[in-house]
Amino acid sequence: MARLDHDALLTAISASVQAAPDPDGLADLVASRGRINVAATGAEIGPAIKRLAPLPGYRWVAINPGDLFAASPLTMGTKVGILDPTGRVLKAADLPRPKARE
């Protein structure tokens, strides 16, 4: 698969998982799977994950498959999953744990 730029990746993942722009502006997209941010380059991956980290529910970063080795370490401990442009899960997402009461 050819490397996609940001707009092409956004279009591809939107079509693949029937996602729509996030009306709250907290992420790039919202789908039945949760919120999705798009990162078309290695430099975009870290900021995309950081924007997702505080959000509730399932969170995903959509990347070009060639960026998996750059993205995977950045998602460790965040519970953010990784999707390719076809919507295939490259790394599963998990729900954030509720904050402990003190």
Image (cartoon, rainbow, N blue to C red):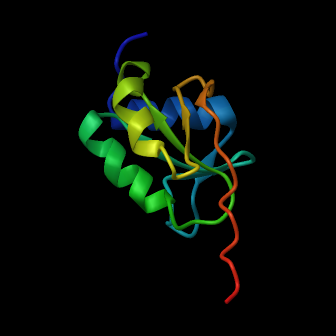
In the rendered structure, the answer to whether residue 26 lies left or right of residue 34 reads left
Label tally:
0
Q: Residue 4: x percent and y percent?
A: 36, 24
Question: Farthest residue toward the top?
Answer: 1
Q: Residue at x 58, y 50 (%)?
A: 79
Front one among 54 and 64? 54
Q: Residue at x 70, y 85 (%)?
A: 101
> Does any portion of residue 7 appear in the rendered image?
no
Quarter of the image that includes the C terminus: bottom right
Q: Residue 65: x percent and y percent?
A: 44, 20
Q: Residue 85: x percent and y percent?
A: 52, 26
Front one among 11 and 100? 100
Question: Farthest residue toward the bottom?
Answer: 102
Quarter of the image that includes the N terminus: top left
Front one among 12 and 46? 46
Q: Residue 49: x percent and y percent?
A: 43, 51
In the rendered structure, the answer to whether residue 76 lies left or right of residue 42 reads right
